[in-house]
Image (tube, helix red, strand yellow):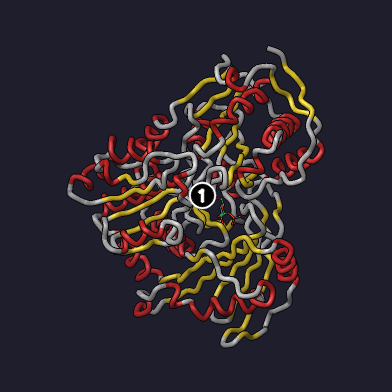
């Protein structure tokens, strides 16, 4: 076996976004597209002074992960990596389980082959995310350097063997994708209490959306906790997710959501394609992710892993400030970070926080460096089992104590990129302080720049925040994960302390504000009569 140099040409479009390099599957299948990025990632890590001995490769099972594994192994081994740990022969494992393996086995980093909650298959999306030795996504200094490298790359290293033979190289070891993760979860949560909760007759549904969490969910919820097998829905992973858009929210998991709103079970939940996101539903009750993080914070001491308390919590800035209220009432520090889990990783590494979350259906903790759907679900089961309350009771009690933050997120997906970029640039410099829109008056518009409190790194212009005189907070940014055109993300929140209004649906309560936001941005003038594609 000899190391060979393969000549290649740079691609222009390999800038990693919020969750790594994510593109349409067909783009990834262009010759050398993946190879270039893999080589660039390894080169940059080496140039950074990192010694790379061991590397993890995992994925959410989407096409063509399994088919490209041999190619990746060849590049890794040719670059001197001595141990390649592959998570599952079929590369089917949730992102948090892969992150756990990277950290637990003290490896030097890894690749996660996933496009998260985006649809999969030949007509869907594929992606590759570069992980650091802490089991978290590479920070911007690294991803920017990788991007620079992809623009000048001329060759990559490989081996003169077939992709098939690479799968059986002595450097390659295959790990069980389920056991380590299930053991970790069992060590953190009160499994006895949850078992009793199921025994007492409470009902449950978990929707794996034909994606990577099915097998882990069966092991954890059924084998270890005693849930019924038929409560785990869509549990067989498929490489195209059976055509489902594996994003657990009321829009893309609509049937499941409707079933829960019709009282299918006491507790319902779902995970996305790569298992780092989750949706939490009670019997006829929807918990928005921002409130979900607040409830987890409020009851964290019921979870054995957190019984000694938290040092602090964090939310991304577009997430509602619900958790801030709970944390402050408990005397905990709260950090507001830009979008993307990597900003939490630095706070987690420094021990400043132990729990964090984003409005985009993700929560997680300090035991790994990725968000974790099953973790959040077990957290809720733990709280339900230990308090004996229902999901709805838990949330309503919190609103009664702290007031309700009405919150909504909506996106215009796949819009014209040039127009969206111009809108973004215009909004950054727009002077609208004091301007009136109908009943609303803007008190302050600001560009959100972030300085990491641990390493001092500055991330500029992570969004535009607009505050009105009636305590409405609007946040606007462009998505960093889309694969076609641009996606405009809008987030709005308003604090309410009049309990007689708490039962209003958020969409109704906020209806005037949607109009206001579109007007401030001039959506109709710029894009014509477009409709937001997902409202949560
Ligand atoms: C989206 C979410 C963000 C999340 C990311 C990866 O990114 O908004 O919270 O971290 O997916 O799951 P965006 O497309 O908004 O850049
Ligand atoms: Zn995901």
Sort mark 1 into few (<14), some (14-19) or many (20+) by Cα contacts within 10 Å. Answer: many
Above or below, comparing residue 294 to residue 16 in the picture: below
**Residue 503 rendering spot, x and y as whole percentages:** 35, 74
Above or below, comparing residue 5 to residue 455 in the picture: above
Q: Is residue 377 left or right of residue 36?
A: left
Picture quadrant where residue 417 is located: bottom right
SS category of the residue bearing label 1:
loop
Which residue is at 53% across, 43% downward? Answer: 121
What residue is shown with label 1? 117
Q: Nearer the viewer, residue 289 or 69?
A: 69
Whether residue 437 is visible? yes
**Residue 285 rendering spot, x and y as whole percentages:** 33, 64
**Residue 529 rendering spot, x and y as whole percentages:** 61, 75
Q: As drawn, which residue projects farthest toward the top?
A: 1
Q: Quadrant of the N terminus?
A: top right
Picture quadrant where residue 502 is located: bottom left
Q: As drawn, which residue projects farthest toward the left?
A: 200
Q: Is residue 365 left or right of residue 378?
A: right
Q: Nearer the viewer, residue 210 or 142?
A: 210
Q: Is residue 242 left or right of residue 429?
A: left
Which residue is at 61% across, 52% downward? Answer: 481
Whether residue 351 is visible? no
Q: Is mark 1 within 8 Å of ligand 2?
A: yes
**Residue 337 rendering spot, x and y as whole percentages:** 59, 56
């Amino acid at each position: 076996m000899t190391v060979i140099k393969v000549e290649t040409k740079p691609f222009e479009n390999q800038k990693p976004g919020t969750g790594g390099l994510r593109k349409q599957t067909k783009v990834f299948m262009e010759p050398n597209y993946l190879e270039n990025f893999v080589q660039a990632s390894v080169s940059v890590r080496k140039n950074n002074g990192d010694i790379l001995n061991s590397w993890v490769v995992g994925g959410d099972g989407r096409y063509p992960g399994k088919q490209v594994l041999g190619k990746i192994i060849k590049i890794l081994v040719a670059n001197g990596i001595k141990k390649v740990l592959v998570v599952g022969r079929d590369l089917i494992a949730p992102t948090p389980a892969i992150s756990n393996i990277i950290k637990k086995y003290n490896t030097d980093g890894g690749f996660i082959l996933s496009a998260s909650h985006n649809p999969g298959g030949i007509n869907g999306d594929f992606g590759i995310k570069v992980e650091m030795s802490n089991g978290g996504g590479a920070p911007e200094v690294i991803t920017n350097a990788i991007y620079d490298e992809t623009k000048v790359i001329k060759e990559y290293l490989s081996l003169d063997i077939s992709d098939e033979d690479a799968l059986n190289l002595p450097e390659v070891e295959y790990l069980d994708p389920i056991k380590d993760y299930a053991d970790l979860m069992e060590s953190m949560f009160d499994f006895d209490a949850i078992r009793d909760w199921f025994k007492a007759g409470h009902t449950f549904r978990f929707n794996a959306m034909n994606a990577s969490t099915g097998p882990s969910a069966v092991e954890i919820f059924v084998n270890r906790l005693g849930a019924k097998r038929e409560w785990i829905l869509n549990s067989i992973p498929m490489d195209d997710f059976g055509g489902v858009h594996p994003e657990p929210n009321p829009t893309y998991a609509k049937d499941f959501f409707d079933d829960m709103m019709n009282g299918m079970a006491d507790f319902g939940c779902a995970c996305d394609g790569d298992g780092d996101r989750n949706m939490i539903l009670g019997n006829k009750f929807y918990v928005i992710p921002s409130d979900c993080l607040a409830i987890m914070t409020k009851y964290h001491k019921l979870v054995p892993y957190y019984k000694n308390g938290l040092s602090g919590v964090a939310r991304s800035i577009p997430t509602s400030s619900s958790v801030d209220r709970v944390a402050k009432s408990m005397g905990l520090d709260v950090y507001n970070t830009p979008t993307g889990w990597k900003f939490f990783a630095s706070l987690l590494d420094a021990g400043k926080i132990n729990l964090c979350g984003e409005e985009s259906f993700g929560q997680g903790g300090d035991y790994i460096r990725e968000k974790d759907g099953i973790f959040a679900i077990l957290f809720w089961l733990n709280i339900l089992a230990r308090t004996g309350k229902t999901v709805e009771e838990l949330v309503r009690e919190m609103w009664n104590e702290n007031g309700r933050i009405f919150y909504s997120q909506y996106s215009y997906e796949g819009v014209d990129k040039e127009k969206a970029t111009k809108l973004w640039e215009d909004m950054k410099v727009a002077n609208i302080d004091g301007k009136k829109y109908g009943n609303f008056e803007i008190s302050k518009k600001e560009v959100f720049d972030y300085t990491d409190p641990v390493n001092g790194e500055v991330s500029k212009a992570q969004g535009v925040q607009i505050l009105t005189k009636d305590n409405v907070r609007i946040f606007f940014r462009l998505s960093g994960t889309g694969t076609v055109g641009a996606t405009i993300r809008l987030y709005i929140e308003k604090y309410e302390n009049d309990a007689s209004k708490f039962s209003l649906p958020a969409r109704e309560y906020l209806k005037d504000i949607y109009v206001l936001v579109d007007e401030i941005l001039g959506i109709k003038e710029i894009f014509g009569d477009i409709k937001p594609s997902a409202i949560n």
